[in-house]
Amino acid sequence: MEPTPQVDSLRSMPQASKRMLIAGNWKMHGRLESARALAEDIAAAIRENEALRAVDWLICPPFVHLPVVAAALQRSADASSDINALAWSARQNDKTTVGRQHAKDIPLYLGAQNLAAQSDGAWTGEVSGPMLLDCGCAAVILGHSERRQHFYETDAMIATKLCLAIASGLVVLLCVGESEQARHEGRTEAVIAKQLEVLTELPPGQREAAFQPVIAYEPLWAIGSGRSANPEDAQKVHASIRKQMLDAGFAAAHLRILYGGSVKPENAAALFAMPDIDGALVGGAALEAKQFLAIGEAAIRRIIAPVPEERKSWPG
């Protein structure tokens, strides 16, 4: 069954873009009604405040809440007057992909927190990429440290999921990050370089022009701890990630690299002042619309006062 145009528009998330991205990982929180209310509050604010539409937004609720959140986002889109189909194009490596947005552009997208390492079939309890598309998802988080640590996901398993996500047409948000021990031993860049091999060693056939991942640097020691990386230290890691991806042949100038790990309104502006931090993957603060939106407002202030050219480390 073909997806409806409304659902299709929800997953037409720009891939080759340098717009900042604020992503919310709701983890295993909430109930149906609270998920609906949170999505409606976020969508209403973005719909009513033009400034908030200067960045892209992604919310990733639990699997069971995806349909109700998708419906809330669609209602918000429908609430915009004069809804018309509007083509947008995203160019990367000389290939153009076309999707749909609304004339009253609301750049708020739906994502999932994980997908199965298998295609459809007899895999009890799993959810496939095509199922996520049916729910209106534009993106999926892969490789989150909580999946690596508590569910023993290996780089090989993440690589398999990555290929399945690409085949399904989902934008991949790949999480990488080092433990506190690796940090103290000076192995941060080596650990992350190894984790990035799931991207850098993709066979040529899967490096299609339409595929441009989002990478989130989340130091394990910062997630849920209330401690955030020093902005300058985070910048060094982000610059290293961008260089590695450039060396591997990706369009690094368009690559969005987010910072995650206890991001909140109080530290967002300092993080976003760094030239290679293109947004945030937000955990706890994403569960309150006011805090989540305030993080986006900090990103908008960077757009108003952009990073000076001489401080940019990425080419282009």
Image: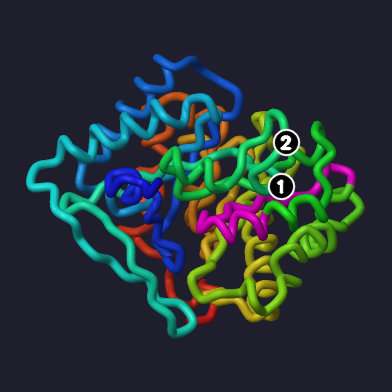
Residue 238 location (% of width, % of height): 64, 62
Mark 1 Cα within 10 Å, few/some/many (few <14, many 20+)?
Answer: some
Of the residues shown, which amino acid type is indicated by label 1?
Gln
Q: Which residues are magenta?
A: 162-181
Which residue appears farthest toward the left when viewing the image? 82
Residue at (58%, 52%) from the top-left corner? Answer: 173
- The colour scheme is rainbow
Residue 283 sits in which quadrant? top right
| Count of marks placed on residues | 2
Residue 268 in view in this figure: no
Horizontal side, residue 98 vs residue 66: left or right = left
Residue 98 location (% of width, % of height): 33, 68
Residue at (34%, 59%) from the top-left corner? Answer: 303
Residue at (40%, 61%) from the top-left corner? Answer: 14
According to the image, label 1 marks what residue? 118
20 versus 50 height, above or below? below
Residue 32 location (% of width, % of height): 44, 17
Q: Are marks 1 and 2 in contact (CB under 8 Å)?
A: yes
> As rendered, which of 133 and 214 lies closer to the eye?
133
> As rendered, which of 109 and 275 lies closer to the eye?
109
Q: Secondary structure at mark 1?
A: loop
Residue 253 location (% of width, % of height): 51, 75
- The answer to if 72 sits in the magenta stretch is no
Of the residues shown, which amino acid type is indicated by label 2?
Trp
1 versus 86 height, above or below? above
According to the image, label 2 marks what residue? 123
